[in-house]
Amino acid sequence: MVLSKRLAAVASFVPEGSRLADVGTDHGYIPISLVRDKTVPHAIAMDVREGPLGRAAENVRRYGLEEQIELRLSDGLDALACNEADTVVISGLGGPLMREILSRGRQMAGTVNCFVLSPQSDIPGVRIYLRENGYRIRREVFIEEEGKHYTVMQVFHGESRPGRYIDDLYGRYLLDTADPVLAAWLKRQAQRLRTLAPALLTSPREETRAQGKRLMDELARVEEALGVMTGQSQ
C-alpha cells in the first residue's frame, strides 16, 4: 500500500510501538500501513459513519489484518476507553470538529500520550486550542500535494511557550525550522498581496479601501513570518 504524501506524513509522526487509535479512519489506510510495516502491533480504527467503516473493514480483510485491527463505530473518541490507546490520530477533519472531539473527550484524552493531528480547516484555531488546553506541538510539517496544502502536527501534553501571533497563523515549529514548503507559500502570498492591496487602497469606495487595509495587515504578518524564517526578525 502506497500512502499519499499527506497520509505518509501522518503515519511518520506515530511513535513506534504505539497502541494506536485512528479517529475518522475512512478507508483505514493509516492503521493498515502502520500495522503492515510493524510500526504498531495493533490498532483501533474508528469512524462515525457506517459507510467508511465498511470500506475500512474490506481493506483490513484484504490485507489479512483482522486480528490486529479492530473496527469501531464511534463519534469522535466516544467508543475509546481510557488507557486503550497511547497515540491517537485525527486526520482529515475540519478544525472546529477536531477541537470539539478533543474537548468532548477531554477525560479520555488525558490518558493519551501523543496526538497526530491534520486539520483541514481553521488550523490557527487548532493551534490556539492546543496551547490553551495544556498541549504542545513537538513537530509540524507543511505539505503540498496536488496543488493543495496540508498541515500535520505531532502533539504531546505540556505547556507551550508564549508565542507570537504569527505562530498561531503559520506554526512556531514551521517558522523556527524555516520549513521550505511554508516559505515558498508565504513568498507567493506576499507577491499576491503586494500586487492586490495597493490597488484596493486607491479605490473611491470605502468598503474596497477597508479590504485593502486588511490585505496590507495580512501582508505585514506574512513579511514578519518570512523575516523570522530568514533570521531577520525574532
Image (cartoon, helix red, strand yellow):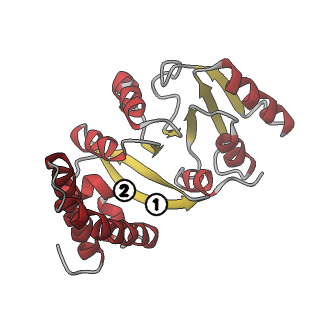
Q: Residues within 10 Å of mark 1 (few under 14, many from 20)?
A: many
View extreme (front): residue: 204
**Residue 163 seen in this snapshot:** no
User: Which of the 4 quarters of the picture holds residue 140?
Assistant: bottom left
Residue 40 in the image: above or below residue 61 = below
What amino acid type should be assigned to the residue bearing mark 2? Answer: Arg
Q: Position of residue 219 (x, y in %)?
A: 24, 64
Q: Residues within 10 Å of mark 2 (few under 14, many from 20)?
A: some
Q: Which mark is residue 138?
A: 2
User: Which of the 4 quarters of the picture holds residue 176?
Assistant: bottom left
Q: Position of residue 148 (x, y in %)?
A: 54, 55
Left or right: residue 179 versus residue 64 is: left
What amino acid type should be assigned to the residue bearing mark 1? Answer: Phe
Quadrant holding the C terminus: bottom left
Q: Which residue is found at the position 27% from the left and 65% from the top?
A: 222
The number of numbered discs placed on residues in the rendered structure image is 2
Residue 22 in the image: above or below residue 217 = above
Which one is nearer the viewer's eye here, 105 or 127? 127
Mark 1 = which residue? 142
Label 2 to label 1: alpha-carbon separation: 14 Å
User: Which of the 4 quarters of the picture holds residue 4?
Assistant: bottom right
**Quick one: SS at disc 2?**
strand
Which one is nearer the viewer's eye here, 187 or 108? 187
Q: Which residue is found at the position 15% from the left and 54% from the top?
A: 204
Q: Position of residue 165 (x, y in %)?
A: 19, 55
Which one is nearer the viewer's eye here, 85 or 55? 55
Left or right: residue 62 versus residue 76 is: right
